[in-house]
Amino acid sequence: MIEMTYYNDHKERWQSYEVSIREHDFYNAEANIYSHDPFCVAGYGATKEEAIEDFKSKFKYIMREWKAFETMLLDTDMITDSIIEIDCMGEPIKND
């Protein structure tokens, strides 16, 4: 699932807060896709046509994930309520 993160450098300037997204490694057997990056899509096949069809299948899966994220972000508070604070290295900050 795509998650929203934020970083605060505590300088209290116009770019002190940075909001971005992160995606854990994901795997989908139906789409035969595994990736570390939600923007990384590669199609494979014995022919160019097979590779294009494989790419299209994986691209459809990625777009469904983005559409679900869009709906949760714009139509609910689910994403913003679960926003994760990260440090300058992108690692989650544990708030005890």
Image (cartoon, rainbow, N blue to C red):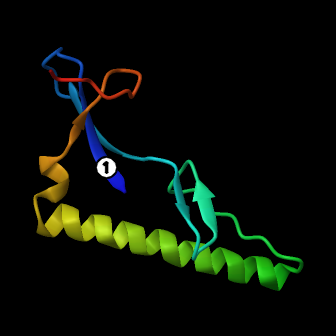
Indicate the quadrant where residue 15 lies. top left
Residue 64 picture quarter: bottom left
> Can you say which quadrant of the picture contains the N terminus?
bottom left
Q: Residue at x 28, y 40 (%)?
A: 5
Task: Depth check: give the residue in front, 9 or 45.
Answer: 45
Query: Is 84 placed above or below 2 here?
Result: above
52 displayed left or right of 13: right
Q: Residue at x 30, y 64 (%)?
A: 69
Residue 63 x/y as whole percent: 45, 73
Q: Return the residue nearer the eye: 61 or 6.
A: 61
Horizontal and vertical percent position of residue 85: 23, 31
Compared with 17, 45 (above or below) is below
Q: Is residue 96 above or below residue 3?
A: above
Residue in the picture at 64% in, 70% down: 32
Total tally of numbered discs in the picture: 1
Q: Secondary structure at mark 1?
A: strand
Quarter holding the C terminus?
Answer: top left
* Percent x, y of residue 61: 50, 74
Q: Amino acid at mark 1?
A: Glu
Residue 60: percent from the left, percent from the top? 52, 78
Q: Nearer the viewer, residue 22 or 13?
A: 22
- Residue carrying label 1: 3
Say whether residue 48 is left or right of residue 40.
right
**Which residue is found at the position 67% from the left and 74% from the top?**
55
Which quadrant of the view contains residue 48?
A: bottom right
Crowding around mark 1 (Cα neighbors within 10 Å: few <14, some 14 to 19, many 20+) is some
- Return the residue found at the far right: 46
